[in-house]
Amino acid sequence: MRIAIVIGLLVIGSLVFHFLSPWRQTPIASNWGEIDNALTITFWVCGAVFVALNLFLAYSVFRFRHREGHKATYEPENMALERRLTFWTALGIVVMLAPGLLAWNKYISVPQDARVVEAIGQQWQWSFRFPGEDGVLGAVATKHIGPDNPFGLNPDDPWGHDDILVEGGEVHLPIDQPVKIVLRSNDVLHNFYVPQFRAKMDLVPGMITYIWLTPIRTGTFEILCAEYCGVGHYVMRGYVVIDEEAAFEAWLSEFPTYGQTRVIAANESGAP
């Protein structure tokens, strides 16, 4: 009897905690409302099952408690019950998976007109690279990384000479325009995550991954590394600033191209 009461109080306490909790999702700042919908559906399905199963458990503990003169019977199988359980379990899985699969199909389908920016993760900082006037990011390789070439661009690749290099952990993006964020790691596993965008993806050493999104409101949003990447993991933060188009273009024009950094480095070293 006491166990049944405790289980019932657990259910009530869980519901009260949910509806009175001050913790809620951050206001969305991208086009990924489908991800919120998928999470909400999963939450309500799991919540309903949690409440139903625990209330049934409390009822069973109370209804079938030990009493003098009552004896339990052994039923090795119940095909009707198994069919019902299989049906409702399968239905719940379909209801939870279908919205996520639809969202994932859109998540990996980048619009043809998406602007491209590369985000590079390195213990424990973020840097960014935009294609220049040719619209193509130049080739990179770890072997090219050095004090004068922290991005690892191939100096022999002409497509990379006009790439715009952004260091300092802050990147700006234009509002209401789709953006493909190409992700690359220079050392260990990282993860590019902006909670307000609802989009995240691992940066895997030796691989190129990506996400895409369309910012829908201006503001400054924090970039987090969502994979443990060493003792400085907690300080690996950056910022995404969503601007109007004119403000974005003005900001981007402040940064040098790879070709310009090579000229500056050559002048500082006195090379011909």
Image: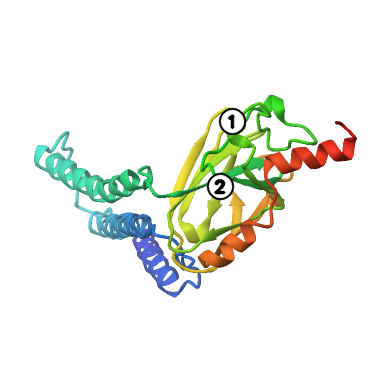
Task: Identify residue type, mark 2.
Answer: Phe
Specify the farthest residue to the front: 272
Q: Nearer the viewer, residue 228 or 252?
A: 252
Locate the N terminus by quadrant: bottom left
Task: Identify residue type, mark 1.
Answer: Ala
Q: Secondary structure at mark 1?
A: loop
The disc placed on residue 192 is 2
Q: Residue at x 77, y 32 (%)?
A: 146
Whether residue 58 is situated above or below residue 12 in the rendered picture: above
Q: Nearer the viewer, residue 126 or 225?
A: 126
Crowding at label 2, few (<14), some or many (≥20) Cα neighbours within 10 Å?
many
Let me know if residue 194 appears in the view.
yes
- Residue 24 falls left or right of residue 238: left
Q: Residue at x 51, y 58 (%)?
A: 195
Q: Calculate the distance from the C-alpha at mark 1 to the C-alpha at mark 2.
A: 21 Å
- Residue 103 falls left or right of residue 214: left
Locate the C terminus by quadrant: top right
Q: Secondary structure at mark 2?
A: strand
Whether residue 23 is situated above or below residue 194 in the rendered picture: below
Image-quadrant location for residue 238: bottom right
Measured from the top left, where is residue 27 in percent x and y? Answer: 46, 68
The tag earlier along the polypeptide, 1 or 2, is 1
- Residue 31 falls left or right of residue 197: left
Measured from the top left, where is residue 196 in percent x and y? Answer: 50, 61
Q: Count of labels shown?
A: 2
Q: Nearer the viewer, residue 78 or 138?
A: 138
Specify the farthest residue to the right: 270
Crowding at label 1, few (<14), some or many (≥20) Cα neighbours within 10 Å?
some
Measured from the top left, where is residue 12 in percent x and y? Answer: 37, 69
Specify the farthest residue to the bottom: 20
The disc placed on residue 139 is 1
Q: Residue at x 19, y 52 (%)?
A: 69
